[in-house]
Image (tube, coloured by chain):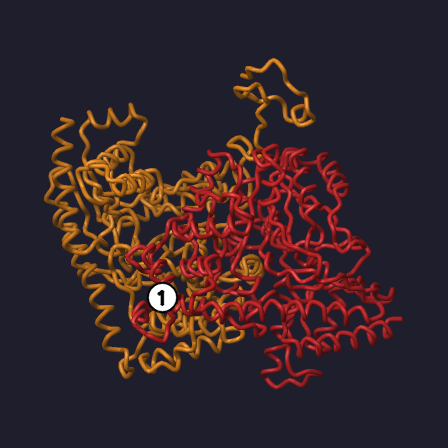
Amino acid sequence: MMSENGALPLRGKVLTVDTMNANVKKVDYAVRGPIVQRAVQIEKELKEGVKKPFEEVIKANIGDAHAMGQRPITFFRQVMALCTYPQLLDDNKFPEDAKNRARRILQSCGGNSIGAYTTSQGIDCVRHDVANYIQRRDGGIPSDPDNIYLTTGASDGIVTILKLLTAGEGRTRTGVMISIPQYPLYSASIAELGAVQINYYLNEEKCWSLDISELQRSLQAAREHCDPRVLCIINPGNPTGQVQSRQCIEDVIRFAVKENLFLMADEVYQDNVYAEGCEFHSFKKVLFEMGPEYSSKVELASFHSTSKCYMGECGFRGGYMEVINMDPEVKAQLTKLVSVRLCPPAPGQALMDLVVNSPQPGEPSYQTFIKERTDVLSALAEKAKLTEEILNTVPGISCNPVQGAMYSFPRITLPERAINEAKAKGQAPDMFYCMKLLEETGICLVPGSGFGQREGTYHFRMTILPPTDKLKIMLNKLKEFHQKFTQQYS
Amino acid sequence: MTKSNQIRFTPEILRKGIHGDTMTENGCEYRERVLTMDTMNPNVKRVEYAVRGPIVQRAVQIERELKMGIKKPFTEVIRANIGDCHAMGQKPITFFRQVLALCSYPDLLEDGKFPEDAKSRARRILQACGGGSLGAYSTSQGIEMIRQDIARYIERRDGGITCDPDNIYLSTGASDAIVTMLKLLVSGEGMSRTGVMISIPQYPLYSATLAELGAVQISYYLDEDNCWSLDISELRRALQEAKKHCSPRALCIINPGNPTGQVQSRQCIEGVIRFAAAEKLFLMADEVYQDNVYADGCKFHSFKKVLFEMGLEYSEKVELASFHSTSKCYMGECGFRGGYMEVVNLDPEVKVQLTKLVSVRLCPPVPGQALLDVVVNPPQPDEPSYDTFIKERTDTLATLAEKANMTQEILNQVPGIKCNPVQGAMYTFPRIHLPPKAILEAKEKEQTPDMFYCMKLLEETGICLVPGSGFGQRDGTYHFRMTILPPKEKLKIVLAKIKEFHQHFMAQYS
């Protein structure tokens, strides 16, 4: 490679796309992928005064509640401030219940400071509180604090478990069953670890439910070329929003036992349940209610986070996992592995403590807390419904009920000409669609191809997070765009 | 060997073979787990991290026993194993905590008790956050405004040499960024497998990560007789040797050093840069202790600065990643997991891959990002919080310097312990001479001799250190790493107890 002035050849770099980690090149994460990069560019252009058919970019690509205007829970932030600057414990503007929680957390910290490292598994008293929360949530089924690992968001715990599970080579390489559609942390991590991705399709005709026969089909096929070891399920679902029935959860557990699969239950949206007749059932609870024949056998890891539900505290990177029936020697390896990164962020751990130890009736902060929590969840429920309704009035868009979580994942019908133009550009048709939507309306969504979908179908994922009025405007713009797009490419 | 004579030939067993299903007492078949030592990730099994390893686990056990009232020759365990400042009594910087509290609960912006300079920084940070909240995700590379502030900090520190904010990546502690870079660098197979040069002794994040990634560890020895300095001839030796069995691609250096505490001379840093340029090695400069410099005549020189002062022939070529953190220096904010790296001369296509990779984990903790912002943007002379800030910072660093000196002095009085000057960082890594009888007994117990020594020290005095074997050392030499973090009075006692123990140990095993 000659430089422009004809001087000596440019020195090749040590680290190039040819010499770098091949697995990393295979990683894709659509939620922050090319369309978002274009959205950021457009925001810069708007700032510079470039004229566009819109005044702002609406980032409906990511489940970032606060960024879209959701307020934090007052009590949580009060306790965080007290933990951060304990001089405030003398300030009578803070309620006693907040102060008590702060004192308790600080007492558990080295040197009474959230600036100290914690144990790698997470602050003891927080893990105890998490265990108590799980126990209450699951109708009294015991939870051992020693089975709780605090993590840097749920993503951290999920990657750690996948890492432990990845072994073998060629036909014995670990296979990981993931739903299609799925949250692309899973596909990205599988690619990075060089594990084998095994797709099982959710049933769009039946509100994205899970069919055991489909699990069976995908497992059989996978056994030809890898060693399936783990089954991942997201409930409530992302991007699809379905809340699995209790029956379905039982069936999945039976399947996991029969087929010797480690179960990973991603339950970060456990408080985000909107549809009538739907209820969140934790895998842990169902497992134990099925009796020792199952509860003594199934290896399960369940994940939770401070990022979703009614808290929306994404930036704090708080999370935990509970491991059930883990081999004790493997558990020792797990503890060793997490120790290398020292500990999860202490502020996130403190925040998780408050989530599982929120104000109780009788405490000064209870009323405000309950009101704030209820308001957030009911606003989300309203917006879930609104979204489904409006999208379903658009010919060519079909939206399953948003039973839970924070997204809609409607199916879009694209004219043949549009599909062809997309392919000519080397773009997935739904990426082509979403890019046009972005350029013409400023609305940033994520194409369904980023999550996986049945061949020949197209979708997009949109969050239901913008404030109701803005959401209405957005949905109407979407409607307008779709009609125009359909016409343009007919 | 199975004791069963009644094997159920399930598809599982037919596929996997029978491996020792055992019968439980009531004759029911015991189902083998999916995830076992045999089926788990083999690289993870090779990982070791001594700083929180077996000796610390024993220390935690002992703490529990003490709590339960069990009598011991001591009343508390002293955790001198880990660089955890606040846990050992160091106070946080007031200004930093004020700003973070304001960011966490912005209602406090109305509170007259907070100084204006803290409030204006909090407002500025919040304006840069989605929805004005620390709870929003940030961009994966980190809040842009903070990266700009960091770039300016680096420019000031490095005498005006330009820093591009786009080359800054905020991270979850420095460890996160170090692992990310190593991950990018690891490729190839067999003879073309990535080799990574690391100092012996080293901070075991490096060896652990290389084991986990299945990269090849290339050890280069620091020169204990010359205050743990780095010999280019030793780098050359290690590299030549390594070329026979792997593809060396990176050279890691920790400056100031951990566990050894040496502050490399400018000359040495230039030598390393020349070596990296000549041998085509990606340089990784771990500089988390950059404010922890104590010894007279020692000065911190950032790799970035030296690189650019060496002129275009080097500054346009050498690929460099430099790491910093909020955990050490005078802040000691380990729990916040704040950190950043600056990448220099990174291939643009690789940089795109890097940005993509970090996006999967969304973003580093925002409180840690905010903390980093105030670290690089501290009170200025004309601001209300300046005097207090300077006093707190100076006190912390001066205390550390005192303790560094004291530690070296006291340990060097002990026959059989030889301690190099603690020029910087937070640790002492003295060499201990162990009698052959002790070494033998250790080997019988299948313990490394310095683990044997440290375990006995722990059981007899409650002092928890990390054996040198956890960091690496020349064959036949033994060390331990001890932090200089306990408060001065306690540190004196700890050192006196170690002196006593060592003499007793020597006598016992003579």
Q: Residue at x 23, y 54 (%)?
A: B485
Residue B252: x percent and y percent?
A: 39, 51
Residue B69: x percent and y percent?
A: 24, 40
Give the residue pinned by disc 1.
A99
Q: Tell me if residue B160 comes above or below residue B305 in the rendering.
A: below
Q: Nearer the viewer, residue B355 or B509?
A: B509
Residue farthest front in this picture:
A362
Which chain is depicted red?
Answer: A
Q: Tell me if residue B378 comes above or below residue B74 in the rendering.
A: below
Identify the secondary structure beneath mark 1.
helix
Residue A265: x percent and y percent?
A: 60, 48
Tint of chain B: orange
Asked whether, in this view, residue B51 is left or right of residue A32, the answer is: left
* Quadrant occupied by the C terminus of chain A: bottom right
- Chain containing the residue with disc 1: A
- For the residue carrying disc 1, how many other residues have a C-alpha within 10 Å: few (<14), some (14-19), or many (20+)? many
Does the rendering let one see residue A170?
no
Q: Quadrant of residue A16?
A: bottom right
Asked whether, in this view, residue A10 is left or right of residue A200, the answer is: left
Residue B468: x percent and y percent?
A: 28, 40
Q: Nearer the viewer, residue A78 or A200?
A: A78
